[in-house]
Amino acid sequence: MSELALTAEKLDAADELAAKRQEFTLDDVVYLDGNSLGALPVAVPGRVEDVVRRQWGELRIRSWTEGGWWTAPERIGDRIAPLVGAAAGQIVVGDSTSVNVFKALVGAVRLARSAGPGRDEILVDATTFPTDGYIADSAARMTGCTLRPVAPSEVRDALGDRTAAVLLNHVDYRTGRLHDLPSLTAAVHAAGAYVVWDLCHSAGALPVGLDEHGVDLAVGCTYKYLNGGPGSPAFLYVRTGLQDRFDSPLPGWNSHAEPFGMRADYRPAAGALRGRVGTPDILSMLALEAALEVWDGVTVDAVRAKSLALTDFFLECVGEYVPEGRVECVTPRPHGERGSQVALRCPDAGEVMKRLIERDVVGDFRHPDVLRFGFTPLYVGFADVERAARVLADVLA
Ligand SMILES: Cc1ncc(COP(=O)(O)O)c(C=O)c1O
């Protein structure tokens, strides 16, 4: 057994989260793609079966009230809240991240405008996941704003008294770079603007501290580190102090103050449920609720500590096994700048990832030349990491 394999054994033996792996359906594959689609928690199939057979099949319409279907978006939002550092009553679950980006960004511009005229610019992370950029462009056209794509490192200089809203990613989906949420949020506020954070790659992976840092609005998906399943509903955070003024661009009947009043005029509900739109996708939502049970007894700090140990160890193994110069790490080394993934650049990345997957090491390829490996501390161990680096070295050789 190699030195590094022995180290992996010791690290796994000392890992306080190791037992959590049993709460997931996994096989012998090294699964480093939880930043695309989290693994299946064992509690989910039984819950979905109950939702379909008993709640839908037997209770039918009664489940909306007696079974808690109607209040699921807020209830599940409150379950996610501590994972992103939010007190209860500020998160609703529903719709996709893309749709929530739209609600949050248009809502942020409207908040800025309600304070006075002259705010006619939206700043967007120029390196963002494409959907955020597309939606920001449409939101800008709809609100009569100019859209300015800027690199996150240039946001501070780009802010000014014309800035209405800023849309940023907490962790870059391609490089795994962690952006400085506290100081960027403070800078946006100092300019009198509102900030929307996309937490897709940080929710469930590292501490976010939404309340602590005074974030205005945030969105995130639940199918990555929260393991909610393919297409599971996203979440929208609106900080308490803004909820009364949050003017959603999608005011559906589910966010009406009196949804069953069937009134022609719209009057928004109080609180976070103002972010709701239409009938929630109950099957996906309740699958997510079951998936969130794996977080019982787990702190995000423990997850973060293991995540950094996993990514450090992966970089160490890659450094040891992979020939010099064959890959270039594009994920920052300092812990304060690293999410829960490692991205390696290599010219033939698409082909390399195909061959890794054939050999049971599953990461993903991001165009044009990035091998992306996600580390989900709830089910990835150190032996997985050592094996992934060893197979990668073999494939590259
Ligand atoms: C940062 C980021 N934002 C948004 C999305 C897209 O979200 P959805 O397809 O759920 O709307 C993704 C998907 O991977 C993402 O990584």
Image (tube, rainbow, N blue to C red):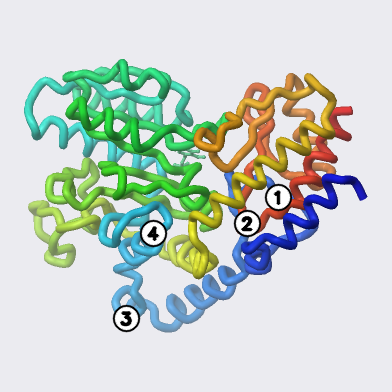
Query: Which numbered disc covers residue 66?
Result: 3
Looking at marks 4 and 2 on the same chain, the residue that comes earlier in the sequence is marked by 2
User: Could you give the CA–CA distance between mark 2 and mark 1, rounded to whole angstroms?
Assistant: 8 Å
Looking at marks 3 and 1 on the same chain, the residue that comes earlier in the sequence is marked by 1
| Label pair 3/4, CB-CB below 8 angstroms | no
- Disc 4 designates what residue? 82
Q: Residues within 10 Å of mark 4 (few under 14, many from 20)?
A: some
Q: Residues within 10 Å of mark 2 (few under 14, many from 20)?
A: many
**Residue 369 placement, left or right of 228:** right
Name the amino acid, label 4: Pro
Residue at 64% across, 32% down: 343
Looking at marks 3 and 2 on the same chain, the residue that comes earlier in the sequence is marked by 2
Residue at 60% across, 48% down: 307
Number of the front mark, 4 or 1: 4
Looking at marks 3 and 4 on the same chain, the residue that comes earlier in the sequence is marked by 3
Name the amino acid, label 2: Ala
**Mark 3 lies within 8 Å of ligand 1 (Cβ measured):** no
**Mark 2 lies within 8 Å of ligand 1 (Cβ measured):** no
